[in-house]
Image: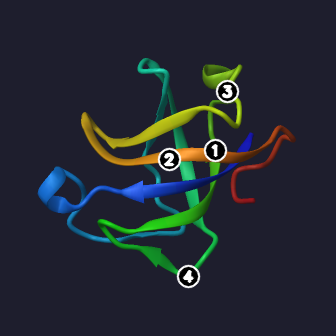
Amino acid sequence: MKIIANIQLKQSSEGGRDNPVYSGYRPTFRWEGNRISDCVITILQGHSIKPGEQGKVEIKILHPKKIEGITTVDHFIITEGSREVATGSISEIQLHPFKIGD
């Protein structure tokens, strides 16, 4: 499953990251509080997103069964361990299967 989304990275002063994220970033995707899946993020505009900035990304969900039922009206958070580093909104969901490395 791939999701096209807009994400907003929290500033480090808000508990977010100190450094930008780049394509290949592998955080945890959380939806509806307890639905969790590892993911891989590809930056679609520019080459990085800095703390405090927003950007358009593609999110490859590595365990799609864990987030069945997600829709384009849903919002999500991105975490590193227990730390929330970004929030996002979904603009498109692509359900076709993919291979790791796509």
Query: Mark 2 or mark 4, which is nearer to you?
Result: 2
**Eyeballing the image, is 81 above or below 26?**
above
**Residue shown at 77% from the left, 49% from the top:** 99
Q: Which residue is mark 4?
A: 46
Give the mark, 3 or 4, whose residue is nearer the N terminus.
Answer: 4
> Which quarter of the image is occupied by the C terminus?
bottom right
User: Where's residue 43, x and y in %?
Assistant: 57, 69
Amino acid of disc 4: Gly
Residue 50: percent from the left, percent from the top? 35, 72
Q: Which residue is mark 1?
A: 90
- Dot 1 falls on a residue whose secondary structure is strand
Residue under numbered circle 2: 88
* Labels 1 and 4: the sequence-earlier one: 4
Residue at the image point whose x is 25% and y is 34% from the top: 82
From the viewer's perspective, is the residue at label 1 or at label 4 nearer?
1
Q: Quadrant of the N terminus?
A: top right
